[in-house]
Image (spheres, rainbow, N blue to C red):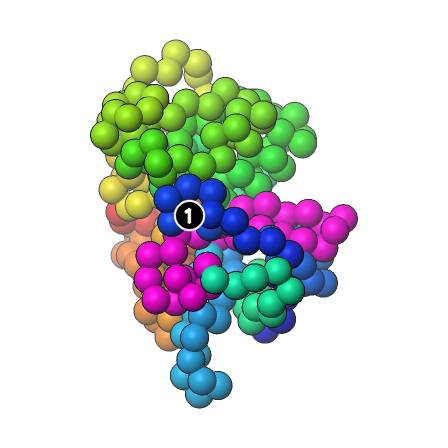
């Protein structure tokens, strides 16, 4: 559904990483962590260019939600210059999210711009009494964001590829040394990270795929990927969240 939302605030929280708070009635339809919005960044009415961006925080009491994105292109660069009071045209909420299941101790693993949707997920899991441990991977210390927010919800461990903060290496260089046992995992990040995490963790879990999209609602086939059973899945409507092993990574 197309919506016009109002920018409440916008802040650069790490190198080229922006956090934008938006307000509007459609927030009441946002219940599932892991869904995304498709934000119009440029284009005429006939040729609209949109970008899929994860929802990182939902505050239904205030009818506000947060999107967190990397400004690394012309469209997202333009979005990063929006100011409080500006109107944003977006389709929302789109896609399937993570199932929020009660009980146990879960491992939450995020890489780079895959980290944001995991914050709302962890919030919702903690709200129903699930214990969460978070492992977050970034390229370098200047890229780190949300460490304190995750730490307020549970144990939080950081890996950086260049070793400038936390464990040197990738998220799997942290997860392979964890001694706790976990009931399931939730992951979001680049495909190579999702594959490494899925291969390494001997438990059930859910992954969220980050892909370039076209329409965002199932008609253009720009986001098709292969299921393990040989059928095709559309990331925008069948995902972006899938069960471990469901998709060929
Ligand atoms: Fe168009 Fe998924 S983005 S079908």
At a point 34% along the width and 21% down the height, the residue shown is 166
* Extreme residue in the top direction: 179
Where residue 14 appears, x then y in whole percent?
42, 41
Where residue 43 appears, x then y in whole percent?
42, 80
Q: Residues within 10 Å of mark 1 (few under 14, many from 20)?
A: some
Residue position marked by numbered label 1 in the rendering: 17
Where residue 157 appears, x then y in whole percent?
41, 23
77 drawn magenta: yes
Q: Quadrant of the N terminus?
A: bottom right
At a point 45% along the width and 37% down the height, the residue shown is 145
Q: Nearer the viewer, residue 62 or 246?
A: 62
Q: Nearer the viewer, residue 22 or 249?
A: 22
Residue 230 position (above or below residue 75):
above
Residue 184 position (above or below residue 32):
above
At a point 38% along the width and 49% down the height, the residue shown is 16
* Extreme residue in the bottom direction: 46
Q: Secondary structure at mark 1?
A: strand
Left or right of 156 on screen, residue 27: right
| Image-quadrant location for residue 205 | top left
Left or right of 163 on screen, residue 68: right
The magenta stretch is 54-80
| Image-quadrant location for residue 75 | bottom left
Asked whether residue 41 appears in the rendered view, the answer is: yes
Asked whether residue 199 appears in the rendered view, the answer is: no
At a point 37% along the width and 16% down the height, the residue shown is 178
């Amino acid at each position: 559904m197309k919506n016009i939302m109002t920018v409440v605030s916008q802040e650069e929280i790490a190198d080229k990483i922006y956090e934008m708070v938006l307000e509007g009635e459609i927030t009441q339809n946002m219940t599932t962590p892991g869904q995304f919005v498709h934000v119009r960044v440029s284009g005429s009415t006939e040729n609209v260019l949109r970008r899929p961006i994860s929802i990182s925080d939902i505050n239904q009491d205030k009818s506000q939600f947060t999107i967190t994105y990397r400004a690394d292109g012309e469209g997202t660069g333009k979005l990063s210059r929006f100011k409080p009071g500006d109107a944003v045209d977006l389709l929302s909420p789109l896609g399937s999210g993570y199932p929020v299941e009660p009980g146990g101790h879960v491992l939450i693993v995020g890489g780079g711009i895959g980290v944001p949707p995991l914050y709302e997920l962890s919030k919702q899991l903690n709200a129903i009494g699930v214990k969460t441990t978070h492992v977050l991977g970034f390229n370098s210390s200047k890229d780190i964001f949300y460490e304190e927010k995750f730490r307020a919800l549970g144990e939080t461990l950081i890996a950086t590829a260049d070793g400038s903060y936390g464990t040197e290496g990738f998220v799997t260089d942290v997860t392979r040394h964890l001694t706790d046992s976990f009931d399931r995992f939730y992951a979001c990040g680049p495909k190579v990270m999702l594959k490494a995490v899925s291969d390494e963790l001997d438990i059930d879990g859910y992954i969220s795929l980050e892909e370039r999209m076209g329409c965002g609602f199932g008609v253009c086939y720009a986001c098709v990927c292969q299921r393990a059973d040989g059928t095709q899945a559309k990331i925008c409507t069948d995902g972006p969240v899938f069960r471990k092993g469901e998709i060929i990574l």
